Amino acid sequence: MRVDEFWALIDAVLAEAPTSIEQRCSALAARLATLSDDDLVQFQQHFDEAMARAYSWPLWGAAYVMHGGCSDDSFSDFRSSLVSFGSERFESALETPEILAELLPEQLDNLAFEGFAYVAPEELERRGLESARVESPEEPAGEEWDEESVARLYPKIAAASAATPAPQPSPPKTPTAKRSPWFVVRLALFFVIISRLIAMLWPQSPPWAPWLGSAALVVVLALASRVTSRT
């Protein structure tokens, strides 16, 4: 597999899943499963080479501002995620990291995903293959920045990151009043008592009148109790 074939495969995966890096991982896994052993090994080598090329202070600074901090492991995730965005954006970001501001805020989470780097190694392991890994340099290329002032180097990214809306907290749930079993028993006893009183006070009333009057009174009292419990 040549390097242009490597990027053609990555670009095809991006076209298949432009908005979700998790779907890109699935698409990449499906495509790698069809490669020959030699092509799979060479794919991993090209991936490692891309990761090594992206190991630079300028790109790390952009990731730092974008995410409000970026450890060494997080920067590794960032670089592998950047590879998933295809050859054109990868090369542009290496030259001018500020262009990544155009991805914010929609693609912010897709630029901090660790899974894309594991797809090829998992397929290699499944086949029992090994690849001569290309390690990143010990030190990033370019000029190191200061954490206190790095945001000034990437004003567009800083502005786009600041404009990213914070997640809104869920509204508090209204507590639901819990009814004790004794509440039902008390209502039943109250119903019987009221019906007896109505029968005693109005002996000439129809037989159903005490029960109907008691039921209406019990319903009114239950509704009043429900309203009171919510206030």
Image (spheres, rainbow, N blue to C red):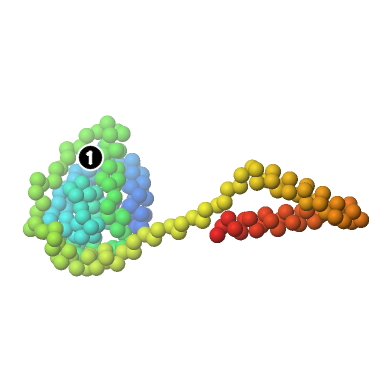
Nearer-the-camera pick, 137 or 86: 137
Amino acid of disc 1: Val
Nearer-the-camera pick, 138 or 67: 67
Q: Residues within 10 Å of mark 1 (few under 14, many from 20)?
A: many
Q: Position of residue 207 (x, y in %)?
A: 89, 52
Q: Quadrant of the C terminus?
A: bottom right
> Residue at horizontal 77%, vertical 48%?
193
Q: Position of residue 185 (x, y in %)?
A: 69, 43
* In the displayed structure image, the side of residue 113 where residue 145 appears, left or right: left
User: In the rendered picture of this protein, how many numbered marks are placed on residues?
Assistant: 1
Which corner quadrant of the image does residue 108 belong to? bottom left
Position of residue 65 relative to residue 26, above or below, is: below
Which corner quadrant of the image does residue 164 belong to? bottom left
Position of residue 109 relative to residue 101, above or below, is: above
Q: Which residue is situated farthest in the right direction here? A: 204
Which corner quadrant of the image does residue 30 belong to? top left
> Residue at horizontal 27%, vertical 52%?
112
Nearer-the-camera pick, 146 or 114: 146
Q: Which residue is situated farthest in the top direction here? A: 128
Q: Quadrant of the N terminus?
A: top left
For mark 1, give the secondary structure. helix
Position of residue 93 relative to residue 184, above or below, is: below
Mark 1 lies on residue: 41
Q: Position of residue 181 (x, y in %)?
A: 64, 42
> Residue at horizontal 30%, vertical 38%?
123
Nearer-the-camera pick, 52 or 197: 197
> Residue at horizontal 40%, vertical 58%?
169
* In the displayed structure image, the side of residue 147 where residue 159 appears, left or right: right
Q: Is residue 31 visible?
A: no
Q: Is residue 103 visible?
A: yes
* In the displayed structure image, the side of residue 20 where residue 136 appears, left or right: left
